[in-house]
Amino acid sequence: MGEKRPRMPRPRAVADLLADALRGKPAEKRLKEGRIWLHWEGAVGPQIAGHARPVSFRDGVLTVAVASAPWMQELNFLKRTLVERLNILIGEPVVREIFLKTGKIDKPQPPAPSPPPLRELTVQELDRVATEAAAIDDPDLRAAFSRLMSRHLALTPPK
């Protein structure tokens, strides 16, 4: 029997691949700026995020829509702290200043429902997976195909 080939490395995250592909290009800067929206709630906390949202970014200035005058006043006192927190989470000094304006704040979208629990496969389904996978010569690919097909079947109602 032949020698078993070494396992392939784990797949890289798409964000990491994009960062590598865009390094040194103008789009790299835009990608970093986009992290503002990803880290906003982590930087300001859920209470502030419920009343203020970033709406635009240009030349180091983040424009934030704020739901009401009392929140506008509160955030005016917190601007420097928020800039620091955002830049720490982004990993570099991208945000230089925050500009506040009154605006409508959309309610955050509820999280997507979690997938149904996996069920145990029937004997017939296990046989089907084994039969389908047997046609694949590469052992790693065969194992990956078996896992994928088994998961798919386990997520669907039995027939």
Image (tube, grey):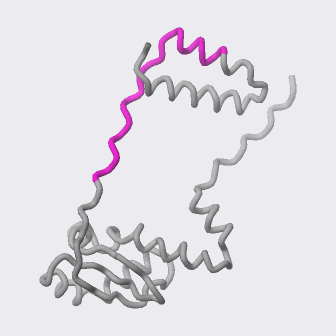
Q: Is residue 81 above or below residue 8?
A: below
Q: Is residue 122 magenta?
A: yes
* Residue at 25% across, 75% down: 52
Observer-nearest of 37 and 120: 37
Instruction: Give coordinates of residue 114: x percent, y percent.
Output: 35, 40
Q: Nearer the viewer, residue 114 or 78?
A: 114
Relative image position of residue 141 (x, y in whole percent)? 71, 32
Residue 95 lies left or right of residue 43; in this view the side is right
How many numbered discs sit on the rendered protein?
0
Question: Which quadrant of the figure has residue 73?
Answer: bottom left
| Extreme-right residue of the structure | 2
Residue 116 versus residue 90 in the image, above or below: above
Q: Is residue 119 above or below residue 56?
A: above
What residue appears at the point 42 percent right and 27 percent down from the top-left corner?
118
Q: What residue is rendered at 43% in x and 85% in y?
A: 95
On screen, residue 69 versus residue 159, left or right, reads: left
Residue 127: where, in percent of width, then height?
Answer: 59, 11
Question: How far across and down, in percent of the image, does residue 148 sit?
Answer: 57, 31
Residue reaching furthest to the top? 124
Q: Locate residue 130 relative to residue 89 in the image: left or right.
A: right
Q: Residue at x 48, y 85 (%)?
A: 93
Farthest-out residue, front: 104
Q: Which of the 4 image quarters holds residue 45?
A: bottom left
Viewer-closest of 110 and 12? 110
* On screen, residue 117 above or below 22: above
Query: Which quadrant holds the N terminus?
Result: top right
Answer with left or right where residue 154 lies relative to residue 131. left
Magenta range: 110-131
